[in-house]
Amino acid sequence: MKHLLFLIAILFINSSFAQKTKPELNLKIGETYFILSHASSTITQTLNSQPNNLNLMFSYKLAFKVIGITEDVYHMEVSYQDVDMRIQVAGQTIEIDSKKKDTTDVPSTIMAAIMNKPFDVLMSKNGKVKSVEHIEKMINSVIDEFPNTDQTKKQQVKAQFLQSFGADAFKGSIEMISAIFPDAPVGKSDKWTINTILASPANAEVKTVYQLTDIVNNAYLIHGDGTMSTEHNGKAGVINGMPMKYNLTGSSITDIKIDKKTGWINELKMKQIMTGSIDVQANPQLPSGMTIPMTFNTDIVNSDK
């Protein structure tokens, strides 16, 4: 009898450990879900054999309102609620803040005008962004309506905003934190691989191996180890009118807490490190071009409230 009870206990324990679960989005129509993000990045450039540091801070709040569900795809109205960007370089600080009340600050005023203007996002249950619609139209219309700015300047501002906030940039940045779910049920300690593309300022391929490390209370705990590399054959991006090609590789470490009921991220911490160089191609401003060695160290913290 003791042996039988022992075998039953062993079978029960093995069965418990072998149970599989499938983390995924389970959102409701009419509900609004939020992402609050804060990223800080230190960029070290080597110019004329001298290191030159640039510090970048980027914070935002996004609202995702579910307005429809078709099969396994959520139709969302998404809007920026708040954006604050700060660049510190050479003892100076440049800030773009959507809350700033200064009409002479053109970038901040444009950013404020973009707030609370919805655009459409289709997202599958596994967190993949299937499409981003109307965000570029929204940005263009806001800048077109901006007074006392000539067309050449407007086109330059449009290009800069679309590079950072256009459909491709939005898709890549959101999928880095949303496209994290396995295709099949997993058990504790199981691993799966997700491939994504970052699109701003240059395309970078990201491969992340995620692992379900624990299930606690009402949350899944997931850890990710990733590798990143810019596309070697990709076309040059343009910054301040100068064509640039990025030759960077790096890694990322991510720890995520996901609401077990909704699949929405409660907390996320990510660290990214990339090293390599940027090749400034020959252009009227820099006829001979230039290669700039660079290192990026970025920390990102997200929450849902």
Image (cartoon, helix red, strand yellow):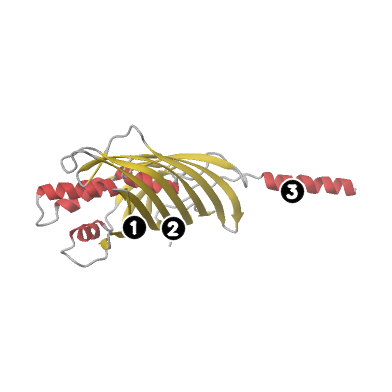
The location of residue 290, given as percent across then percent down, is 26, 41
Quarter of the image for the C terminus: give it: bottom left
Dot 3: within a 10 Å radius of its alpha carbon, few (fewer than 14), some, or many (20 or more) residues?
few
Seen at 44% across and 59% down, the residue is 304
Q: What element does badge 2 sit on? A: strand
The location of residue 58, given as percent across then percent down, is 34, 57
Front residue of this view, candidates 206 and 285: 285
Q: In the image, is 151 to the left or to the right of 6?
A: left
Q: Earlier in the sequence, mark 2 or mark 1?
A: 1
Q: Which residue is mark 3?
A: 13
Q: What element does badge 1 sit on? A: strand
Front residue of this view, candidates 169 and 185: 169
**C-alpha gap between disc 3 and disc 2:** 37 Å
Q: Amino acid at mark 3?
A: Ile
Q: Which residue is mark 1?
A: 55
Q: Nearer the viewer, mark 2 or mark 1?
A: 1
Q: Is residue 44 visible?
A: yes
Seen at 85% across and 49% down, the residue is 5
Q: Amino acid at mark 1?
A: Asn
Q: Which residue is mark 2?
A: 301
Question: Tag count in the figure?
Answer: 3
Residue 129, placed above or below residue 115: above
**C-alpha gap between disc 3 and disc 1:** 51 Å
Q: Earlier in the sequence, mark 3 or mark 1?
A: 3
Q: Nearer the viewer, mark 3 or mark 2?
A: 2
Q: Using the rendered view, name the quadrant where residue 147 is placed.
A: bottom left
The location of residue 70, given as percent across then percent down, is 41, 42
The location of residue 144, given as percent across then percent down, is 15, 51
Q: Is residue 138 visible?
A: no
